[in-house]
Amino acid sequence: MPRFIRDHSLSLAFLVIFLAALIGQAIAGHILQNEEAMAHGGEQTSFWRYVVSSEFGNAVMENWQSEYLQFMLFMFFTIWFIERGSPESKEPGKEGLGTLKEQRIGEHAVEDSPEWAKPRGIKTFIYSNSLLIVMGIIFICSWFAQSVTGWTQFNAEQTDHGEQAVSWLSYIGTADFWESTLQNWQSEFLAVGSFVAITVFLRQRGSPESKPVGAPHDATGVEG
């Protein structure tokens, strides 16, 4: 077990702080909802009822879908686009999918290569793009979940104000939906873009996300 923890400490560390943040969000959201209910003479809800509510689900899904969109686009863009001097970019001149030899595909696969990297055909194509495919599926599912929970919450508010409920298609065309969606997207794009640019000039010793401390500013990728 200690070896397992050591070998997977990065993902486990993020799992722990993710769960802590999610629980904290649920607790804070539940308190806030009950405070608002008391202020307006409404009924308080249980913690479990809040956790399974559209309000909490929408708040969570808004962030999940934007995060996976960020990673999906970052992976795709780094195939073709470069940022000279950034460790997050390939070196200039190495844009594109790479050769079969570079990617160890088919006859260029080594003994311990994944099985789906060895055959040539649909299996290799799927495996070659499996990371982007899975990230895309998660993004679409979380975006859809956000739209459904947001739609449910929106119609509940419409009913409370004596207004007519709208269809799902009508809701995803509203400013309410796109305001909450785009405010997450723009922050993710800013974070990734600024990180790519900042790592050209700044360093963090010991991190694989940074170039070596003494590497020249124009050293790109793992070069230097």
Image: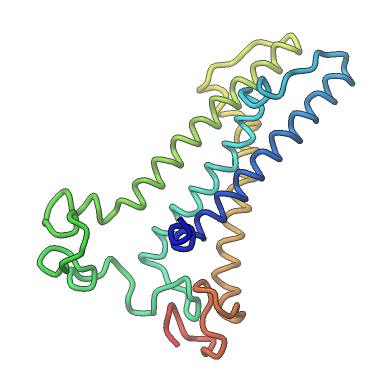
Q: Is residue 106 above or below residue 212?
A: above
Give the residue at x 60% y 43%: 19
Residue 116, percent across and down?
Answer: 18, 54
In the foreground, 94 or 2: 2
The quadrant of the image that shows the C terminus is: bottom left
Q: Is residue 40 above or below residue 113?
A: above
**Colour mode?**
rainbow
Q: Is residue 61 above or below residue 12?
A: above
The quadrant of the image that shows the N terminus is: bottom left
Residue 10, percent across and down?
Answer: 51, 60
Give the residue at x 41% y 59%: 75
In the foreground, 185 or 15: 15
In the foreground, 112 or 70: 112
* Residue at the outermost front position: 1
Q: Quadrant of residue 73?
A: bottom left
Q: Quadrant of residue 148?
A: top right
Count numbered badges in the picture. 0
Q: Quadrant of residue 13?
A: bottom right
Residue 63, percent across and down?
Answer: 59, 43
Give the residue at x 71% y 18%: 157
Residue 62, percent across and down?
Answer: 59, 38
Give the residue at x 21% y 63%: 113
